[in-house]
Image: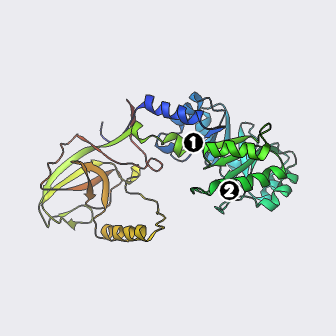
Amino acid sequence: MTGVTLRLDVDRWREHLRVVAESTPGLVPVIKGNGYGYGHARLADEATRLSADTVAVGVPAEVAAVRERFDGSIVVLQAWRPGDALAEDLADDDGVITTVSRLEDVRRLAETGKRTRVLIEVLTSMRRHGIAPEDLTAAIAALGDLRFEGWTIHLPLQLGAGYTEAERLGRAAVEARRGTLWYSHLPSEEAIGLSRQLGGPSDPVPVRLRVGTRLWLGDPGSRESTATVLDVHQVKRGMRIGYRQRAIPSDGWIVVVSGGTSHGIGLEAPTPAASLRQRAISAATGTLEAAGLALSPYTIGGRKRWFCEPPHMQASMIFLPRSQQPPEVGQEVPVELRLTTATVDRIVEV
């Protein structure tokens, strides 16, 4: 079978999952998007294997796929908004915990008379969703018959300063009403210390940690991704190839391999480029891409090779210099995938 393959060392992967789970207080596995490249069903099965009582999904539409394989509670991370029919239906579901991030939405949901299980989101320095600390008491007063499950605090990805914000917002939350603090992006050891600091050694405040990437993708050595060589053509300098009929810069080979935009190959999120050096690299890379010289994620002969043109939907054309022996049709070559955006044709357990 041709295509893009992810080979997974299941025993090693599960050992990594076990280590993370045992070191993470109140672990809530996150199962969202493309299932971190593994799919919702597989991750839901693994969450059950880890004895998790709760998982988190990104949006209401993901609840159904996870529920098929997981019997515990499911947190919907996307904040509830009036008018979302599916979210409103799930508000009646006793197995779902709804996130509410605006004071007016707490009131609107309470006015329905439902006994929805809710997490109230606290506004962090991300400035994405959440109720400001000074309005948390009003949010509690507006709950009505809603069942309060705690406070959710989604911290930014930052090194060193996260604990200060986690402590400040956690303290404001438990002063409004004591309840479980659900954090994202807070190290386990800091969560344990914060729990005791806010509640005291004899009565720590319960803390739960949502973990996605570190849990599912934290051991790169447990997996390997490859693509199948579909065709090989010898070319001469100046020959025109591909959809865009670009001229080949020198003699060599065109290697056609499986994998394209439908697999997430060649799709890239913007990078922060915070430093001058990073900006220079981005500018240089952009110039190369404009000239049709984008470096591909495929490795042939021990090196990553250049795209001949942007990848197609299900295949990519790679240029190999004349000095390099081309691979055989049917051979598999390594391809580097960003699994949070990738879709593979098959997963093989090894």
Q: Which of marks 2 and 1 is nearer the N terminus?
A: 1
Q: Where is residue 294 in the image (x, y as percent from the top left)?
A: 31, 62
Q: The residue tagged with tag 2: helix, strand or loop?
A: helix
Query: Which class describes the residues within 10 Å of circle 1: few (<14), some (14-19), or many (20+)?
Result: many
Q: Position of residue 330 (x, y in %)?
A: 22, 40
Compared with 304, 291 (above or below) is below
- Numbered marks: total: 2
Q: Residue furthest front?
A: 201
Instruction: Name the residue beneath numbered marker 2.
Output: 164
Query: Which class describes the residues within 10 Å of circle 2: few (<14), some (14-19), or many (20+)?
Result: few
What residue do we see at 26% from left, 58% from top?
306
Front position in the image: 287 or 191 = 191
Q: Where is residue 272 in the image (x, y as percent from the top left)?
A: 49, 64
Judged left or right of residue 32, residue 329 is left
Q: Quadrant of residue 225?
A: top left
Q: The residue tagged with tag 1: helix, strand or loop?
A: loop
Q: What residue type is labelled 1?
A: Ile
- Disc number for residue 72: none
Q: Where is residue 152 in the image (x, y as percent from the top left)?
A: 71, 49
Instruction: Name the residue beneath numbered marker 1.
Output: 31
Question: Image quadrant for the C terminus?
Answer: top left
Does residue 79 show up? no
Judged left or right of residue 216, residue 84 is right
What residue do we see at 24% from left, 45% from top?
229
Question: Image quadrant for the N terminus?
Answer: top left
Of the residues tagged 2 and 1, which is closer to the observer?
2
Q: What residue type is labelled 2?
A: Thr
